[in-house]
Image (cartoon, grey):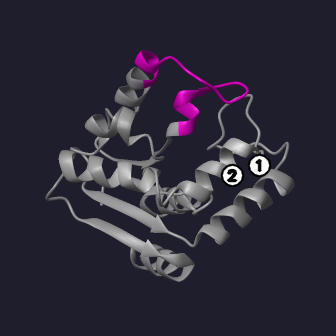
Amino acid sequence: MRRIVILGNSGSGKSTLARKLGAKLALPVIHLDVLFYEPGWKPGDLGRFRERVTGALAGDAWIVDGNFLSLTGDLCLPRADTILWIEQPRWRSLARAAWRSIHQRGRGRADLPAGCRDSLDRETLTYIWTFDRVARRNIEHILAHQVPSRPVRRLHGDREVAAFLDQAG
C-alpha cells in the first residue's frame, strides 16, 4: 500500500484513519478539504483545486482523504493501489459530526482548511443524512467507470477499521 484513497460519509472516520495510517506507513496525507475550501467553507476555484491535487499526487506514495471523486477521481483513482471505503451507520456519522462541532471548536486540525471551523449546519446534516441515497450512488458510479477492475476494501464499522489499521504495514 503506497497510494491509498479513503472514502466514506462525513463523520465516518476518514481523516482519523488517514492520519493513523499515514503515521504507521510513513506516508503523506492529502486532505482534500484543505485543498478545496477557502476560509468560511467557501468553495475554491476548480482549476486551482485540480492544480493543488495534481501537485500533491506528484509523489510516489500518499493517502488521499476525501470524497471529491467527481472533481478529482480522474487524478487519484487510476494511480491508487488501494481504495478504502469506511461504512458507518448514519447515526454514528451524525454523532461524530456533532461531537466535532462541539468539542473541537477552535482547535486546529490538519484536515480543516484555514479559516474553517467544524459546525453542524443544515448542509452538513443533509449531506450525512442523505449520503447513502445520493453521494454513495455517485461515488459507486465513478468507481465503476474510472477503475472498474480495482477492488474497493469496505471497512464496516470501527472494529474493522481498527483491525485493518493493526494489520497494515
34 over 52 or under it: above or below: below
Q: Given contact means CB atoms under 8 Å apart, are the residues at marks 2 and 1 in contact?
A: yes
Assign the C terminus to one quadrant of the image: bottom left
Foreground of the two, 26 or 12: 12
Question: Which residue type does callout 2 highlight?
Answer: Leu
Q: Nearer the viewer, mark 2 or mark 1?
A: 2
Residue at image position (84%, 47%) is 105
The image shows residue 22 at horizontal and vertical percentages of: 48, 56
The image shows residue 49 at horizontal and vertical percentages of: 45, 24
Residue at image position (30%, 41%) is 76
Magenta range is 33-49
Residue 152 in magenta?
no
Q: Which mark is residue 125?
A: 2
Residue 73 falls in which quadrant of the image? top left
Assign the N terminus to one quadrant of the image: bottom left
Q: Is residue 94 visible?
A: yes
Q: CA distance from mark 2 to mark 1?
A: 7 Å
